[in-house]
Amino acid sequence: MKTAGILGGFGPESTAKFQLEIVEIFRARKIKTRPPLLIWQTPVPLKIEKTLVLKSKGVSKFLPFLVKGAKRLEKGGANFIVIPCNSLHILINELRCSVKLPILSIIEETSGALGEKRISKIGVIGTEVLIESQLHQKCLRSHGIHPILPSKKNQDLINQSIGAILGNNNAD
């Protein structure tokens, strides 16, 4: 069984949830062994994360942290890497050049799966910097899927919600 390297820590709760979902998939399929996982909880200062989410700036400041984490996962014995944060896929090409391991893309894998199911349109929710990058939109369109994007007002609410989660200010 191959070892997955999870490059996470951007909203550590999402990394933990991602790990638990993988374990649950194995349980549901009645696989008797839990999957081997290596997790690198990337120590990015919260200020950098909030600047990305709330102001759509500073994505390049993540790159040194991501490269260091990817290299640690590679040295640790991972066979491939996944990143449970959509927004940081903006840097996936640079990351792919930094290690010899394959790095799977949430965006590519999801778009492909939706295309196979013949989904014709889908809503895209993410940070403003992700929406502006058009990563989802381009990939979805390449699979014949029409992306539906949030209005400016809704995008502001999404950014505020993500910012609140990052600051542990979860709204009820």
Image (tube, rainbow, N blue to C red):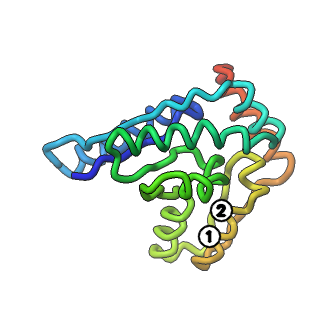
Which amino acid type corresponds to the residue marked 1 in the rendered image? Leu
Q: Label 1 to label 2, Cα distance in Å?
A: 6 Å
Q: Is residue 1 visible?
A: yes
From the viewer's side, name the closer residue of 108 and 59: 59
Percent x, y of residue 48: 73, 31
Residue at 72% from the left image edge and 45% from the top image edge? 127
Residue at 62% from the left image edge and 74% from the top image edge? 145
Left-right relation of 9 to 16: right
Secondary structure under the numbered disc 1 in the rendered image:
helix
Label placed on residue 132: none
Residue at 17% from the left image edge and 48% from the top image edge? 30
Which amino acid type corresponds to the residue marked 2 in the rendered image? His
Left-right relation of 110 to 32: right
Percent x, y of residue 6: 43, 42
Left-right relation of 166 to 8: right
Residue at 51% from the left image edge and 29% from the top image edge? 13
Percent x, y of residue 135: 68, 62
**Is 45 drawn above or below residue 73 in the view shown?**
above
From the viewer's side, name the closer residue of 32 and 64: 64
Residue topped by disc 2:
136
Residue topped by disc 1:
140
Crowding near the residue tagged with mark 2, few <14, some 14–19, many ≥20 C-alpha atoms within 10 Å: many
Mark 1 in CB contact with mark 2 (< 8 angstroms): yes
Q: Is residue 171 visible?
A: no
Secondary structure under the numbered disc 2 in the rendered image:
helix
Image quarter of residue 172:
top right
**Is 70 drawn above or below residue 119 in the view shown?**
above
Percent x, y of residue 88: 63, 47
